[in-house]
Image (spheres, helix red, strand yellow):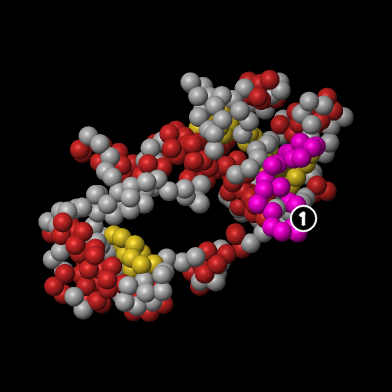
């Protein structure tokens, strides 16, 4: 016996009906993933109008339900709710015959399947791509893993910090002592997993709708991040090695592209990379004598003058508060902005239309 494809009875999060003119209206996605990368891919597809059915096991379900719970906060956590808004939720045991039949029935009418198990798990369950494609030839199946479905590390465990470590990205996220930091923005999970999967699925959907043939997408978070590590690769080709912190154009080697501490222990982000922006910054600061001290006019990147001028700028920014500097640069066209904390960004006019994305 198979269940109805209408899962409205199982909704655990508010899921308004997709507008008829949404880009993915009429597309059905089965989301078997857990934690962060796959659920983000499913969320992005749901935001584009797809009907996303999140399938969790009948036990604990998605581990994200219990992660990062606040004191006295009942599950599911805000982490789970942020990632799974707009989805329908169903519980299936894919080792149970009746639930397997239900799943097969859903696959026969689905357009996309997202899964994030270790390589080989879907095949061992009897749901490898070849099997599912016989049920639905146009099915696009995206398998998101740390190191890819094949290769020497296919079965290795990992998390975001491991993926970006292998890809040469963590090495570039260095502090002033050139030691890697631990970023609280999960580059491998969010970009290498979630966004890369959504992008690949959209392309595969176009092909499937044109030809009637789906495909199996191998989304390796480590490989996707590696492919996007472009600016350090430029240095590698230019000089035979990547640049260390404070020695290149975009990693702290020029005073016009830097973060400066303010009097109240906050920060301003200076992105005056182009000469016109730098010279406007100099006008705001009343330092016309600095206008020629710019990388595009021959200042050596990471050189003595660049470091000396960074020190001079640091002293200037340390003389006033972040609020003072923000006001002073508010109308200046030179890419100087405050470094906001998330609670401040949530109330900034810039995010009036999008702040709900971070409100579970």
Residue drawn at (68%, 20%) of the image? 124
Chain part drawn in magenta:
55-76
Looking at the image, residue 35 sits to the left or right of residue 74; the answer is left
| The quadrant where residue 73 appears | bottom right
Location of the C terminus by quadrant is bottom right
In the image, 120 versus 206, the foreground residue is: 120
Q: Which residue is mark 1?
A: 74
Looking at the image, residue 7 sits to the left or right of residue 67; the answer is right
Q: Is residue 64 magenta?
A: yes
Q: Is residue 238 visible?
A: yes
Q: Is residue 70 magenta?
A: yes
Residue drawn at (60%, 40%) of the image? 38
Residue drawn at (71%, 47%) of the image? 66
Picture coordinates of residue 36, whole percent (x, y): 60, 44
Looking at the image, residue 41 sits to the left or right of residue 225; the answer is right
> Is disc 1 surrounded by few (<14), some (14 to 19) or many (20+) residues within 10 Å?
few
């Amino acid at each position: 016996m198979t269940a109805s494809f209408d899962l409205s009875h199982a909704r655990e999060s508010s899921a308004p009906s997709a507008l008829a003119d949404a880009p993915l209206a009429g597309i059905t996605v089965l989301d078997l993933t857990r934690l962060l990368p796959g659920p983000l891919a499913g969320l992005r597809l749901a935001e584009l109008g797809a009907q996303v059915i999140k399938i969790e096991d009948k036990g604990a379900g998605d581990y994200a339900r219990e992660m990062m719970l606040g004191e006295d906060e009942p599950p599911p956590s805000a982490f789970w709710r942020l990632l799974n808004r707009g989805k329908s939720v169903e519980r299936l045991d894919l080792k149970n015959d009746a639930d397997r039949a239900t799943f097969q029935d859903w696959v026969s009418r689905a357009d996309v399947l997202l899964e994030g198990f270790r390589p080989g798990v879907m095949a061992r369950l009897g749901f490898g791509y070849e099997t599912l494609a016989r049920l639905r030839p146009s099915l696009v199946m995206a398998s998101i893993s740390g190191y890819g479905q094949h290769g020497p590390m296919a079965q290795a465990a990992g998390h975001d910090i491991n993926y970006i470590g292998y890809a040469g990205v963590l090495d570039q996220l260095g502090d002033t002592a050139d030691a890697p930091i631990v970023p609280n923005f999960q580059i491998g999970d969010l970009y290498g997993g979630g966004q890369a999967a959504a992008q690949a699925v959209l392309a595969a959907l176009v092909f499937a709708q044109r030809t009637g043939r789906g495909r199996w997408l191998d989304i390796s978070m480590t490989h996707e991040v590696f492919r996007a590590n472009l600016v350090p690769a430029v240095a590698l080709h230019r000089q035979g090695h990547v640049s260390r912190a404070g020695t290149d154009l975009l990693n702290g080697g020029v005073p016009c592209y830097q973060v400066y501490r303010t009097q109240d222990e906050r920060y301003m982000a200076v992105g005056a990379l182009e000469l016109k922006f730098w010279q406007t910054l100099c006008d705001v600061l009343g330092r016309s004598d600095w206008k020629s001290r710019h990388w595009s006019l021959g200042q050596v990147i990471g050189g003595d003058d660049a470091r000396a001028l960074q020190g001079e700028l640091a002293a200037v920014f340390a003389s006033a508060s972040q609020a003072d500097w923000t006001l002073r640069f508010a109308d200046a066209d030179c890419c100087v902005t405050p470094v906001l904390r998330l609670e401040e960004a949530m109330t900034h006019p810039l995010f009036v239309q999008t702040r709900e994305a971070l409100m579970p």
